[in-house]
Image (cartoon, rainbow, N blue to C red):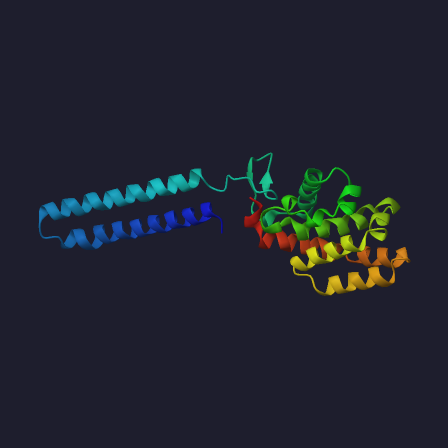
Amino acid sequence: MNQKKKVSLIMLIVACVSIIGAILLFFVAVPSATASYKKVLEIVIGVLLILMSALIAYYLWLTRDNDPNFFLFDRAKKRNVPVEALTFATVNERMNIYLSMVCESVEELWQDDILENERKLGYRKVYRPLLAYKMLYDLADKNVDSYWNLLLNAKPETVDSLCSALQQGGETEMVKAFRFIMTNYRSNPAKVKDFIIGNMKYIRGRMMGYIKKRIEFFY
């Protein structure tokens, strides 16, 4: 949870406690008060508590999720959409934007080992697994020789970085299978293509799950 969310949560708790306090004053303390000045004082305190709660609620409404989230921000609506409304089409579009920010060409992406450049991977390298998934997804999505050759001719260090990035995202079995394919069938492109194309749906799902689980890191 980011700092803004923590502050908002604390303020919401204060507002709820204030309302409860005002209710107790009006329905318990005031009726049982023996002196007139006590009743007036308790009523004034209750009113102030209600006003404070109303001001907090108004502030929270004004400052509601307006910080643009990289994946959730809707440029037309000028606000973040709920994470439940996030689609892979949007994720893919935003990742294309991200790629244009970290490299000038797909060749640079595969040859310069961007996956090991911490300056381009965001806070705690949160974009690293996503970038690895995106690299594999684009191979299958484009499905042209110029893209496949980038993988087939990739340096061992690049393949290792790709596997490491996937492991950072929680992959185990896919990494083992990918290493096996690249070690034993690099000279047989059809095998490599079948493996990655066959996992397109899985890769999409993993990207979506990774983002939704860590959505707070993309503000």
Residue 32, horizontal then vertical, whole percent: 14, 55
Up-down relation of residue 141 to residue 188 (above or below): above
Residue 199 position within the rendered picture, expressed as x and y whole percent measured from the top left: 77, 57
Horizontal relation, residue 105 to residue 63: left or right:
right
Horizontal side of residue 197 vs 96, given as left or right: right
The residue at the point 85 percent across, 51 percent down is 153
Q: In the rendering, at what x and y percent does residue 215 appear?
A: 57, 50
Look at 79% across and 46% down and name the residue there: 111
The picture quadrant where one finds residue 37 is: top left
Q: Left or right: where does residue 63 sit relative to residue 22?
A: right
In this image, 47 relative to 12: left or right?
left
Q: How many marks?
A: 0
Q: In this view of the protein, which residue sits in the foreground, 210 or 12?
A: 210
**How far from the left and from the top, in percent, is residue 121?**
64, 47
Between residue 219 and residue 75, name the one nearer to us.
219
202 versus 108 height, above or below:
below
Residue at image point 16% right, 53% down: 31
Q: Quadrant of the C terminus?
A: top right
> Viewer-proximal residue, 98 or 137?
98
Instruction: Check the image and name the residue furthest to the left.
Output: 35
Residue at 21%, 45% (x, y): give it. Answer: 45
